[in-house]
Amino acid sequence: MQDLTEGVARFQRDVFPAKAELFAHLAAHHAPHTLFIGCSDARVVPELITQGEPGELFVIRTAGNLVPAYTPAANGVTASIEYAVAVLGVRDIVVCGHSACGAMTALAEEHDLSGAPMVAGWLRHADAALARTAGMAAGPAKVRALVRQNVHAQLANLATHPCVARALAEKKVTLHGWVFDIPTGRVEALDITGAGTALAA
Ligand code: ZN
């Protein structure tokens, strides 16, 4: 906690003054251009990876960057997606997976999650991704494949939300699938076939 308190003091002293004008504008304006859906993993920091300024990214972070498919019952993820797309009018949505994802590793290596039943239940939202890698032997290659398949599966889930389906039909929003590689800092943009191309070097 001491580190956090010192960080806040450093922010107010060294960082905020240079951005005071931006924050003064943001005080009355909230118009992010992108909904960024990433993993809660502490190593995957959306604003750092994209060098986005405050006000640019509307961020949802969940374990395994999972997006439950639409159901009529409201929940935090669904409501946040709807707010970003239907109210704020984001133009792009990124679903970002990452290397060494604990959630994907647990699934790929069939970890015993009996001590974390909520995690086990939540990870069922990756069932389609897991099904696509069912034929692979457990190991690093399967984790890598699952991370990618999971981004595709969550983009498909995302498109089941009526607000997203409508924005896609009206060509008001574009979906993107990324994978962040922790040891190299590279971001791979996945294409429809999953082959992928690196974003910058
Ligand atoms: Zn993760």
Image: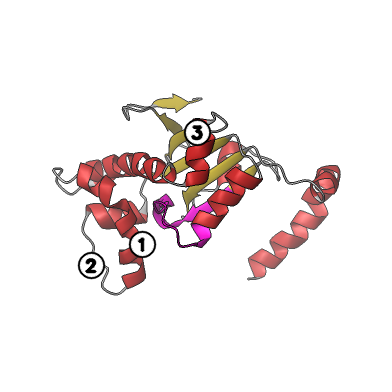
Query: In the image, which is nearer the foreground, mark 2 or mark 1?
Result: 1
Determine contact: label 3, label 2, CB under 8 Å.
no
Q: Give how far apart the Cα atoms at labels 1 and 3 are.
A: 26 Å
On the image, the x and y values in percent for residue 190 come to: 39, 31
On the image, the x and y values in percent for residue 189 come to: 43, 30
151, 79: nearer the viewer:
79
Determine contact: label 2, label 1, CB under 8 Å.
no
* Disc 1 residue type (three-letter): Trp
Residue placed under numbered mark 2 in the picture: 112
Residue placed under numbered mark 1 in the picture: 122
Looking at the image, residue 17 sits to the left or right of residue 74; the answer is right
| 71 drawn magenta | yes
Query: Taking the image as drawn, is residue 182 in sight?
Result: no
Q: State which region is magenta.
A: 59-77
Looking at the image, residue 41 sits to the left or right of residue 156; the answer is right
Disc 3: CA contacts within 10 A as few (<14), some (14-19) or many (>=20): some
What secondary structure is found at the residue carrying circle 1?
Answer: helix
* Disc 3 residue type (three-letter): Leu
